[in-house]
Image (cartoon, rainbow, N blue to C red):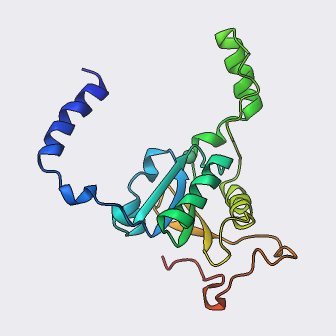
Amino acid sequence: MSIIDKAMDANRTYARNYDPTMGKRPRPKIAVVTCMDPRLSDLPAILGLPHADIDVIRTGGPAVTDDVLGELVVSTRVLGTTEILLLNHTGCGFTTFTDAELNATLSASTGDGSPAPMRFYSYSDPEQNTQEQIKKVRSHPWIAPDVPVRGFVFDVETGRLREVKPVGRPSPDGMLARKNPTSVAPESQAP
Ligand SMILES: [Zn+2]
C-alpha cells in the first residue's frame, strides 16, 4: 500500500472524531515562513503556539519568492495576522547544491534541458539567507511598517532558535522604522 493510500485510511478515522467547529473561519495571529524540511513541521511545539494561531507558508529553504510575499500580504492584510516570523534552519537540503549544478545535473541525467535555468533558491548560509529575507519582506510596500518581521535560525542539533539581526540601515523613506519603539530589536529568546 502506498503512503498516500495509508493516509487515506487514517483520514477516515480522523474524520470520525473531527471537531465541526473547525469549519469556522480561522483567526490566525502570526505568519511563519519556513522550510519544507520535516524537522520544521511541528511548529506548535517549536514555537509553543496553538495550531490555530499560525499561518504557515512553506517553501524549500525557505525561499521568499514573489508568491510568498503575496501570501504574507494576504495573511497580514486580509486574514488578520499581526507578526511575521521567518524561520530558517541549519542542515538545510537547499545548501547541498547550487542552482547551476542542479540544472546541469538534471539536464544531463534526463536528457532534457528545456526547464533550465530553473530557480531552486539554493543558498549557502542560513544566517545570510535570513538577513536577505528580512530585508525583502521589510521593504515590501504592502507589508505594514508596524508588523514586526523577525528572522531566526532553528538549530537541528539542539532544537533552539537563534535570532538573526537585520542588517543595513533603514531606507530613506523610513520603511524599516517601527512605529512602536518598544518593539524594536528585542534580544534573542532566552535559552
Ligand atoms: Zn531546509
Q: In the visual, does 54 lie left or right of 99?
A: left
Res 118 → quadrant: top right
One can see residue 1 in this view = yes
Q: Which residue lies furthest to the right in this view?
A: 172
Q: How far from the left and from the top, in percent, is residue 122?
A: 69, 41
In the depicted view, which residue is nearer to us: 70 or 3?
70
Q: In the visual, does 42 lie left or right of 158?
A: left
Position of residue 41 relative to residue 24, above or below, is above
One can see residue 89 in this view = no
Res 93 → quadrant: top right
| Residue at image coords 68%, 48% | 66
Q: Residue furthest left?
A: 16
| Residue at image coords 67%, 36% | 120
Position of residue 13 relative to residue 175, above or below, is above
Q: How far from the left and from the top, in percent, is residue 178?
A: 69, 82
Q: In the visual, does 14 lie left or right of 2?
A: left
